[in-house]
C-alpha cells in the first residue's frame, strides 16, 4: 500500500523542501512554496534492498557508429518548418508557450489537420476545451473535414493508454498544465504534476517514434509556467509572441536540439486562422510612406533571415521633476546607456526631457545592432527633422562612443536594397558597395550626430 508524504514545492523553480519557508533558497523567490502530497509507491527502495531486479545492463554503442538520422516530416507551412529546422523530427518532444489568446491552439490545430490530410495519424488532446468547442473552431478554420482524432481528457494514464492503442505519428497536448497523474496527489498545474506529466509524455514519445507537442501556459513575466526542468526534458522550446492589437505573430525558438536556436517564424492572423507572412522583411515598416521625424529603419537579423523594423522615438520636455523613460520592444537598460553615451561622448543633452522609444508592429529588438537605429531616431526627434529618405541603420555602440561592427552586414544590406532602400548608415569594415545602396560608414557616434543633427550639440 502506498504511503503519502507532505512536501513543500517551489512553484517558481520546482525545488522541494520538507518544511515551509517564506523564501525559496534555490531561486530567491518569496511566498512560492506550496504544500503538496507526494505518494511513495511500493517497490521503490525496499524492493531494491530485497534484491529485486528492475532492469538489465545498459547497452553501449561506439561514438563513430554511423546511423541514419530520422527523416524529418515536412509540415508544409514554410515559416513553421523554418523554425523547426526543416520539419518535425520523429521521437521528439516540443514545448510551445505563449500568452492566452495569442493563437497557439489555432496554429497547432491547423498543423494537425494538414498532417492528417497528408496521410499521417494526428491526435489532438485538449484538457481545456470541450470537443464541441474545438469542432466549432475547426469549422471556422475550414479544416473540419480533416481526419484528426480528437479527445478531451486530463487523466494522464487514460491518455497514454489511448495513445499506445492509436499509435499516432503526431500528437498535440493542449495543455500540459491541465493534466494530472495518479502517482501524485498534488493538484493539476502544480510543479510536481507538470514535471511528472511532461516526463511521462516525453518518455512515451521517445519509445513510440511519434512527434509530440506540449502547449504550456506562461506567467506574467512571460516564462512558461511550472518548473524549468520541463524545458530541459523536451527537445525544442518555442515561444509564441505578439500583441493582440497587431495581426502579426512571431514563433521564436529558444532551444532546438535539431536545428538553429535563433530562427523565427512570422505569421499573420486572418479570418481563417494563422498564415505564413508573405513578405516578412517588410511587415514591421510603416505603410504611410511619410518620412516623419523620430523614425529610423533598423536592418535586423533573425537567424538566417534579415528583417527590417521601424524604430520610433519621441523626446519631449518633461512636465514633472523626474523625466520619464518609456520603452516598448527594446531593452530599457540599453536606452539608458545610449542616452548616457550621447551626453558624455557627443555633447547631446537629454537630461530633463521625457524619452519614449517604441518598435513598430509588435517586433522586439534583441540584438545590440539596433543601437545605431535607436540613436538615429532619438537625434531625429531632438532636432525635429526627418532622416534621409529610404535609409537604414545598424551598428552596436560602445560606451566609448565607437560604433562596432555586427554580424552578417552583407545580408542586411542586400535585403534593404531588395526592398528599395537607397542609403545605409553602418559601421566600418562592411561591404564597400551594394547595388542600389549608398553606404555611409560611421566610425563613432559623434560622426552620426554631425551628419544628421549637428544643432543638437550644446
Image: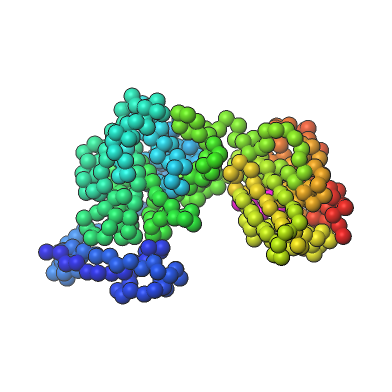
Nearer to the camera, 287 or 97: 287
Q: Main secondary structure of the magenta part?
A: helix
Residue 39 horizontal side relative to residue 252, left or right: left
Q: Is residue 385 above or below residue 182?
A: above
> What is the magenta range?
366-371
Q: Is residue 281 visible?
A: no
| Residue 367: in magenta span | yes
Tell me: 127 left or right of 12.
left
The reply to whether the magenta stretch includes residue 74 is: no
Depth check: give the residue in front, 196 or 132: 132
* Left or right for 211, reference 447: left
Colouring scheme, one of rainbow, by chain, secondary structure, one colour: rainbow
Q: Residue at x 31, y 75 (%)?
A: 19
Q: Position of residue 45 (x, y in %)?
A: 19, 68
Residue closest to the eye, 138 or 196: 138
The percent coordinates of residue 90 (x first, y second) are: 37, 40
Residue 391's place in the image compared with 135, above or below, is below
Residue drawn at the location 29% of the way across and 38% of the way down: 130
Q: Position of residue 69 (x, y in %)?
A: 41, 41
**Is residue 252 visible in the rendered structure shown here?**
yes
Determine the residue positioned at 32% across, 37% down.
Answer: 124
Question: Camera-side residue: 15 or 379?
Answer: 379
The residue located at (80%, 60%) in the rendering is: 349
* The image quarter in which residue 88 lies: top left
Q: Quadrant of the N terminus?
A: bottom left
Q: Quadrant of residue 112?
A: top left
Picture coordinates of residue 225, whole percent (x, y): 40, 55
Amino acid at each position: 500500500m502506498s504511503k503519502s508524504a507532505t512536501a513543500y514545492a517551489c512553484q517558481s523553480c520546482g525545488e522541494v523542501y520538507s518544511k515551509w519557508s517564506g523564501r525559496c533558497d534555490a531561486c530567491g523567490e518569496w511566498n512560492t512554496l506550496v504544500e503538496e502530497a507526494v505518494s511513495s509507491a511500493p517497490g521503490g527502495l525496499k524492493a531494491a534492498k530485497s534484491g529485486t531486479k528492475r532492469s538489465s545492463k545498459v547497452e553501449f554503442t561506439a561514438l563513430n557508429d554511423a546511423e541514419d538520422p530520422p527523416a524529418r516530416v515536412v509540415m508544409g507551412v514554410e515559416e513553421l518548418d523554418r523554425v523547426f529546422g526543416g520539419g518535425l523530427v520523429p521521437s521528439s518532444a516540443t514545448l510551445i508557450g505563449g500568452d492566452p489568446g495569442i493563437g497557439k491552439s489555432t496554429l497547432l490545430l491547423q498543423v494537425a489537420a494538414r498532417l492528417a490530410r497528408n496521410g499521417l495519424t494526428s491526435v489532438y488532446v485538449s484538457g481545456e476545451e470541450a470537443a464541441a468547442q474545438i469542432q466549432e473552431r475547426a469549422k471556422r478554420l475550414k479544416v473540419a473535414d480533416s481526419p484528426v482524432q480528437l479527445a478531451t481528457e486530463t487523466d494522464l494514464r487514460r491518455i497514454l493508454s489511448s495513445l499506445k492503442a492509436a499509435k499516432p505519428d503526431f500528437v498535440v497536448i493542449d495543455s500540459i498544465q491541465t493534466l494530472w497523474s495518479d502517482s501524485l496527489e498534488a493538484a493539476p498545474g502544480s510543479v510536481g504534476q507538470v514535471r511528472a506529466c511532461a516526463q511521462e509524455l516525453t518518455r512515451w514519445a521517445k519509445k513510440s517514434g511519434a512527434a509530440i507537442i506540449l502547449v504550456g501556459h506562461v506567467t506574467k513575466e512571460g516564462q512558461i509556467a511550472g518548473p524549468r526542468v520541463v524545458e530541459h526534458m523536451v527537445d525544442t522550446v518555442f515561444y509564441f509572441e505578439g500583441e493582440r492589437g497587431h495581426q502579426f505573430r512571431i514563433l521564436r525558438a529558444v532551444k532546438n536540439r535539431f536545428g538553429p536556436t535563433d530562427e523565427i517564424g512570422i505569421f499573420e492572423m486572418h479570418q481563417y486562422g494563422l498564415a505564413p507572412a508573405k513578405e516578412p522583411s517588410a511587415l514591421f515598416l510603416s505603410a504611410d510612406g511619410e518620412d516623419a521625424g523620430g523614425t529610423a529603419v533598423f536592418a535586423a537579423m533573425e537567424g538566417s533571415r534579415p528583417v527590417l523594423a521601424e524604430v520610433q522615438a519621441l523626446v519631449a520636455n518633461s512636465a514633472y521633476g523626474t523625466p520619464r523613460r518609456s520603452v516598448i520592444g527594446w531593452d530599457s537598460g540599453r536606452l539608458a546607456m545610449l542616452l548616457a553615451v550621447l551626453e558624455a561622448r557627443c555633447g547631446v543633452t537629454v537630461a530633463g526631457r521625457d524619452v519614449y522609444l517604441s518598435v513598430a508592429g509588435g517586433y522586439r529588438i534583441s540584438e545590440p545592432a539596433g543601437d545605431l537605429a535607436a540613436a538615429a531616431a532619438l537625434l531625429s526627434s531632438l532636432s525635429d527633422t526627418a532622416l534621409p529618405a529610404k535609409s537604414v541603420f545598424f551598428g552596436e555602440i560602445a560606451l566609448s562612443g565607437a560604433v562596432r561592427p555586427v554580424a552578417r552586414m552583407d545580408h542586411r544590406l542586400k535585403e534593404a536594397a531588395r526592398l528599395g532602400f537607397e542609403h545605409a548608415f553602418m559601421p566600418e569594415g562592411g561591404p564597400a558597395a551594394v547595388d542600389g545602396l549608398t553606404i555611409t560608414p560611421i566610425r563613432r557616434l559623434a560622426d552620426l550626430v554631425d551628419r544628421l543633427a549637428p544643432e543638437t550639440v550644446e
